[in-house]
Image: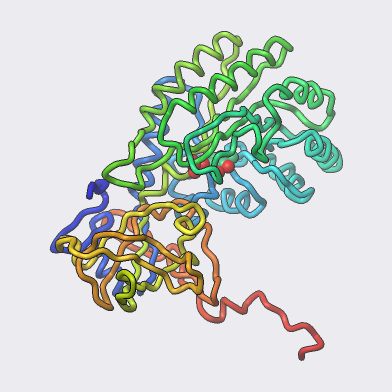
């Protein structure tokens, strides 16, 4: 199987960023998330470079929902990243990671008044999802005696080749304001005293392996920019969202790069803003592309079983990686302690959760397995730990970060005490 350069096999062991997975599993236990900081930084630089070599005024925002670990966000902040945040919690994480408020965009289709107040208090721009929200934000900003800078989330009504649950710019999806209504929404915003409309924003979906839909979205966005310019509005930023996919099937999926993305999108963007007579900042919001392949989950085989087929029962399940169960997602698996052994036997790798759907990898050719073997689930850095849970009374596992010659915990494992730490005794049970 093709491996990215930070994953190597030496002496039969899988290594992440030069660190032996077998040693890491012995030091930190399993299950274990292992993330290469250097890989994330390389991806960020490539994204930044692909766009800024074609247009000088670019801001790359990391989609914090993909991986909310502070260490990951801090590494990106140090390279100049901002963040797309979807909650007060993500806003707080981004600020703590050192991202300045002016590099954040507060997104979301259902914000509370306290979300809006937090954005106003921090001076974070808000991507407004409805006229109702616009007027609520105007009132919140008036109360705080401030003016909130906003963009509108545009629904561009575009079909994209991805799983329907992560297509976000369909005419039928819950996100944004239909593109035809944006000029009217802008007019409405211009009449609000405590709101200043400065941008437009879209995000068409996630795990998109063809760059052409991004060019189509850019076309819709620059058309709106031109219409707004005709109304005398000069946009200060245009945010094209995230969505660039990664090759989860290492040997067969296309692997579009930020260069491919820029080649498709930038001609449309550049011609469009020229026609509109504006020079806005170009914002993008990649999540998955920056972090997905940086991370493996190491999980120990508890037992094997031959029933109608062969099962390997491991200690990580959809409590730690819900993508296969939720999106039928595919993740490559490697036997990390015998990574060069011949692939002789078909296994279905199942987790410990009491659900039939708790399958991490179905029908994969692996070496003959035994209890104690160590399996690495690849490409788990995006929407992995971030979507984890304590389901079935399972404390979440630790996360380790590797960087150069060093390894360190970036999140401790939860304990049994963590399972009950937020629970309170109703008084009648005392
Ligand atoms: N921006 C917005 C508004 C999103 O909703 C998402 C993900 O759903 C992203 C960016 C990041 O998408 P991806 O991780 O596919 O790059």
Residue at 40% of width from left, 55% of height from top?
380
Q: Is residue 212 above or below residue 350?
A: above
Residue at 40% of width from left, 66% of height from top?
409
Residue at 34% of width from left, 78% of height from top?
302
Q: Quadrant of residue 217?
A: top right
Q: Quadrant of residue 422?
A: bottom right
Q: Is residue 178 above or below residue 167?
A: above
Q: Residue furthest front?
A: 308
Answer left or right for 201 relative to 41: right
Answer left or right for 193 relative to 296: right
Residue 150, x across and y down, in percent: 70, 32
Q: Nearer the viewer, residue 78 or 251?
A: 251
Q: Nearer the viewer, residue 268 or 411?
A: 268
Q: How many marks?
A: 0
Residue 90, x across and y down, in percent: 60, 51
Residue at 69% of width from left, 16% of height from top?
228
Residue 259 visible? The answer is: yes
Answer left or right for 89 relative to 37: right
Q: Nearer the viewer, residue 13 or 119?
A: 13
Answer left or right for 195 relative to 423: right
Tell me the quarter of the image containing the C terminus: bottom right
Quadrant of the image where one finds ligand 1: top right
Residue 83 visible? The answer is: no
């Amino acid at each position: 199987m093709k491996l990215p350069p930070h994953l190597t096999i030496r002496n039969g062991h899988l290594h992440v960023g030069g660190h032996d997975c077998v040693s890491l599993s012995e030091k930190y236990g399993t299950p274990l998330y292992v993330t290469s900081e250097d890989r994330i930084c390389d991806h960020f630089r490539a994204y930044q470079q692909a766009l800024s070599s074609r247009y000088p005024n670019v801001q790359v925002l990391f989609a914090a929902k993909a991986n909310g670990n502070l260490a990951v966000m801090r590494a990106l902040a140090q390279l100049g990243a901002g963040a797309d945040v979807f909650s007060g919690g993500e806003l707080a994480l981004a600020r703590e990671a050192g991202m300045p408020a002016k590099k954040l965009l507060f997104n979301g289709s259902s914000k509370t008044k306290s979300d809006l107040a937090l954005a106003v208090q921090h001076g974070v721009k808000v991507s407004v999802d409805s006229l109702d929200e616009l007027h609520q934000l105007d009132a919140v900003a008036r109360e705080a005696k401030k003016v909130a800078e906003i963009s509108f989330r545009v629904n561009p009504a575009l079909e994209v080749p991805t799983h329907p649950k992560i297509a976000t710019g369909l005419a039928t999806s819950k996100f944004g304001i239909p593109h035809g209504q944006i000029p009217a929404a802008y007019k409405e915003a211009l009449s609000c005293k405590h709101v200043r409309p400065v941008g437009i924003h879209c995000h068409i979906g996630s795990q998109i392996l063809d760059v052409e839909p991004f060019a189509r979205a850019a076309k819709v966005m620059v058309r709106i920019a031109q219409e707004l310019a005709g109304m005398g509005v000069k946009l200060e930023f245009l945010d094209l969202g995230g969505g660039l996919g990664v090759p989860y099937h290492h040997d067969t999926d296309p692997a579009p790069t930020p260069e491919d993305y820029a080649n498709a999108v930038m001609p449309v963007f550049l011609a469009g803003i020229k026609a509109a007579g504006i020079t806005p900042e170009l914002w993008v919001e990649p999540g998955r592309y920056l972090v997905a392949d940086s991370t493996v989950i190491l999980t120990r085989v508890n037992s094997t079983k031959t029933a109608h087929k062969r099962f390997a029962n491991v200690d990580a399940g959809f409590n730690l990686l819900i993508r296969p169960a939720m999106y039928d997602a595919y993740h490559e698996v490697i036997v990390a302690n015998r990574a060069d052994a011949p692939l002789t036997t078909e296994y279905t790798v199942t987790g410990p959760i009491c659900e039939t759907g708790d399958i991490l990898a179905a029908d994969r050719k692996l070496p003959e397995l035994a209890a104690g073997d160590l399996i690495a689930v690849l490409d788990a850095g995006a929407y992995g730990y971030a979507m984890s849970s304590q389901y079935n009374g399972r404390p979440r596992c630790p996360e380790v970060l590797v960087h150069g010659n060093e390894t360190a915990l970036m999140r401790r494992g939860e304990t049994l005490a963590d399972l009950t730490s937020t629970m309170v005794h109703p008084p009648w049970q005392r």
